[in-house]
Amino acid sequence: MRFQISQRRNMSAASILDSMVSVTSLNHGGASKALSQVGDNHPVVVLKNNQPSAVIITPADYRRLTQAEENFALYRKAVERLRNDDSTLLTDADVFGEDYEPIDDGFEPEFE
């Protein structure tokens, strides 16, 4: 993610200008050209009255951004929980009950 952010900051002025298209241009047959310019990590900014009004991105970029937003929300929730932590630890019996016995069925969970 850091590479993508630093890569974005190093965009030349020419490439930034090339990634902008006016609403008027889109209305006069320029939509196809604008869509052909959209690529992974290369959004197209739509201008209305010389102000950014929309951004066109790829589905992959959209998924990446929504995933980052979800991850950040989870991070904030974790930080809040840590901030309010009373340091109470639960045992297996507290969580699963006194009669719980783990099953060894050979299944090994994968962690990412």
Image (cartoon, grey):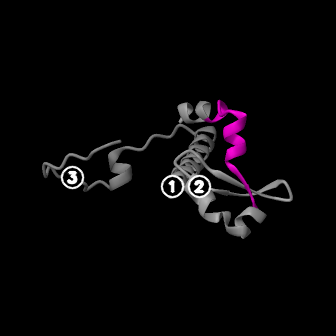
Residue 36 picture location, percent across and down: 56, 56
Query: Residue 51 in magenta?
Result: no
Q: Are marks 1 and 3 in contact (CB under 8 Å)?
A: no
**Earlier-in-chain disc, 1 versus 3:** 1
Q: As drawn, is 91 to the left or to the right of 16?
A: left
Whole-Å distance between the Cαs marked 2 and 3?
Answer: 50 Å
Closest to the observer, 83 or 56: 56
| Element class at badge 2 | loop
**Front: mark 2 or 3:** 2
| Element class at badge 1 | helix
Q: Residue at x 45, y 40 (%)?
A: 89
Whole-Å distance between the Cαs marked 2 and 1?
Answer: 10 Å
Residue furthest to the right in view is: 49
The residue that mark 2 highlights is 57
The residue that mark 1 highlights is 63
Q: Residues within 10 Å of mark 2 (few under 14, many from 20)?
A: some
- Amino acid marked by disc 2: Ile
**Earlier-in-chain disc, 2 versus 1:** 2
Q: Residues within 10 Å of mark 1 (few under 14, many from 20)?
A: few
The residue that mark 3 highlights is 101
**Front: mark 2 or 1:** 2
**Front: mark 1 or 3:** 1
Q: Residues within 10 Å of mark 3 (few under 14, many from 20)?
A: few
- Amino acid marked by disc 3: Glu
The magenta region covers 8-22
The tag on residue 51 is: none
Query: Residue 11 in magenta?
Result: yes
Q: Residue at x 13, y 52 (%)?
A: 105
- Amino acid marked by disc 1: Arg
Q: As drawn, is 83 to the left or to the right of 62?
A: right
